[in-house]
Amino acid sequence: MTTFALVGAGPGLGLATARRFGGAGHAVALISRSAEKLDALTAELARDGIQAGGFTADVLDTESLDAALYAAAAALGPIEILQYSPVPRADFMKPVLEATADDLDAPLAFSVKGPVTAVNAVLPGMRQLGRGTLLFVNGGSAVRPHPDRAGTSIAFAAESAYARMLHDALAAENIHAAQLIIPGAIRPDAEHSSPEVLARRLYEIHLKRDGFRHYAEPLPD
């Protein structure tokens, strides 16, 4: 059995993707800052018959993230799929004319250092398996910067560039890097952006391996 590792586990999209990949036969490693949240999520997955473990880490603390991913692989099996989808903090979204250089430190750590750390932790195991999938989930500001959300617009663009380079550099090794852009809010009643629909879309991206950037729905005009 191989493992689906989710960085940014939560009760919405995170739980839905954990169910989708876990239901397909993967063990599930949930990574979040909150041990209490992880306990609740792993218990819920266990009721569905899915083997899951929770591992605490803060994506702004690269050592803790690295340790969590290594612990997950040791406990559950080699990580075949990594999903990086933590939710940005509200203070990352200052208007561009109010943002200072220091205001970019945390967003860039969150969206660049975090993904680089996570990928470097799982890549050796994927290479041993001879396959792997790296899934990056971002909001619309990754491709259409918003002047009221300077931190995420800048940091998501950098994450997108990193993910695209991985897509090109790892294709020959059967390791597929892809990005899913979710332009609006994730809502249970959304036709294209409900947690369950997005989870199915991410699983489809993993299976089809047919390109880098995907959209949950068209960007609004």
Image: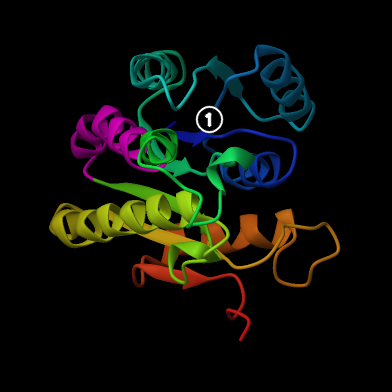
**83 shown above or below 213:** above
Residue 191, by quadrant, is bottom right
Q: Establish if 17 lies above or below 37.
A: below
Residue shown at 61% from the left, 86% from the top: 221
Residue 170 in the image: state x and y as whole percent.
Answer: 18, 53
Residue 152: percent from the left, percent from the top? 48, 51
Q: Which residue reaches farthest front?
A: 97
Prevalent SS, magenta region: helix
Residue 117 falls inside the magenta stretch:
yes
Q: Position of residue 42 (x, y in %)?
A: 69, 22
Q: Residue drawn 73% across and 44% down? A: 12
Name the quarter where the N terminus is drawn: top left
* Outermost bottom residue: 221
Question: 215 or 93: which is nearer to us?
Answer: 93
Foreground: 196 or 183?
183
Query: Which quadrant would residue 71 be assigned to in this image?
Result: top left
Q: How many marks?
A: 1
Above or below: residue 221 compared with residue 56? below
Residue identifier under label 1: 27
Residue 89 appearing in the image:
no
Image coordinates for residue 213, horizontal then vertical, percent: 40, 69
Could you tell me the amino acid type at mark 1?
A: Ala
In the image, which residues are magenta?
A: 111-130
Within 10 angstroms of label 1, few (less than 14), some, or many (20 or more) residues?
A: many
Residue 13 visible in the snapshot: yes
